[in-house]
Image (cartoon, rainbow, N blue to C red):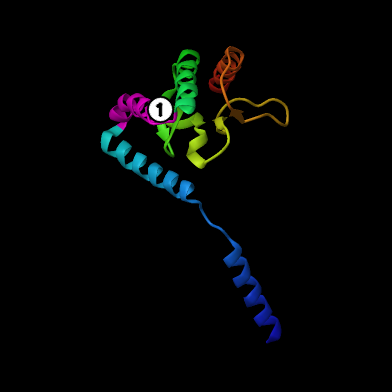
């Protein structure tokens, strides 16, 4: 009986120490649910046509430094992988192939981080040996950074 009480107390203590989702994470999940509803209402053609407008509108809402990077990244992705379709993904600008997100931009403000992130999902063809980077921290974008991202985006869709 004593052992059962200890187990119950231990599991209760563990549950209380669990933080759960942050407000930012909850907001991102709500945004994603809304994105799915909007895409379902639009249908395949509408989602593709409005994806660009949705991404541009989301970028326009960002803080000045995040917006400047997001605008440049949007141009780099479109120039290097025109087959990728812009779309919103958890409230972030993302670029998809056959409906699956290949890469995305997460502003620093999205989760109150000290830097923005440009990342790739697992369908991106970036495999290089047994380990390779899938996300990059960004504080600003230089011409060299843009060139490297352009190369990675090309490789990701190849």
Q: Residues within 10 Å of mark 1 (few under 14, many from 20)?
A: many
Residue span colored magenta: 44-63
Q: Residue furthest bottom?
A: 1
Q: Quadrant of residue 84?
A: top left
Nearer-the-camera pick, 47 or 30: 30
Q: Quadrant of the N terminus?
A: bottom right
Nearer-the-camera pick, 113 or 78: 113
**Chief secondary structure of the magenta portion:** helix
Report if residue 100 lies within the magenta region.
no
Place of residue 153 in the rendered image (x, y in percent of width and height, measured from the top left)? 55, 20
**Which residue is found at the position 48% from the left and 17% from the top?**
81
Q: Quadrant of residue 59?
A: top left
Disc 1 target residue? 59
Place of residue 98 in the rendered image (x, y in percent of width and height, measured from the top left)? 43, 28
Place of residue 74 in the rendered image (x, y in percent of width and height, measured from the top left)? 45, 21
> Against 81, is 6 above or below?
below
Q: Is residue 52 left or right of residue 134?
A: left
Q: Quadrant of the C terminus?
A: top right
> Against 144, is 6 above or below?
below
Nearer-the-camera pick, 65 or 156: 65
Nearer-the-camera pick, 149 or 97: 149
Place of residue 34 in the rendered image (x, y in percent of width and height, measured from the top left)? 34, 43
Q: Residue furthest front?
A: 64
**Which residue is found at the position 65% from the left and 27% from the top?**
127
Report if residue 50 lies within the magenta region.
yes
**Which residue is found at the position 37% from the left and 25% from the top?**
56
Question: Regarding mark 1 in the picture, which secondary structure is present there?
Answer: helix
> Against 30, is 81 above or below?
above
């Amino acid at each position: 009986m004593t052992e059962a009480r200890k187990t119950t107390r231990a599991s209760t203590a563990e549950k209380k120490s669990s933080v759960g989702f942050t407000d930012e994470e909850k907001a991102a999940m709500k945004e994603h649910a809304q994105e799915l509803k909007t895409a379902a209402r639009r249908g395949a053609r509408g989602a593709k046509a409005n994806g660009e407008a949705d991404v541009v509108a989301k970028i326009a809402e960002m803080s000045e430094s995040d917006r400047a990077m997001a605008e440049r990244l949007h141009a780099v992705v479109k120039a290097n992988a025109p087959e990728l379709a812009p779309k919103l993904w958890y409230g972030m600008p993302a670029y998809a192939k056959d409906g699956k997100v290949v890469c995305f931009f997460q502003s620093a403000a999205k989760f109150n981080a000290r830097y923005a992130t440009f990342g790739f999902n697992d369908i991106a063809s970036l495999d290089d040996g047994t380990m390779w980077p899938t996300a990059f921290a960004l504080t600003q974008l230089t011409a060299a950074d843009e060139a490297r991202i352009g190369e990675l985006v090309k490789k990701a869709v190849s």
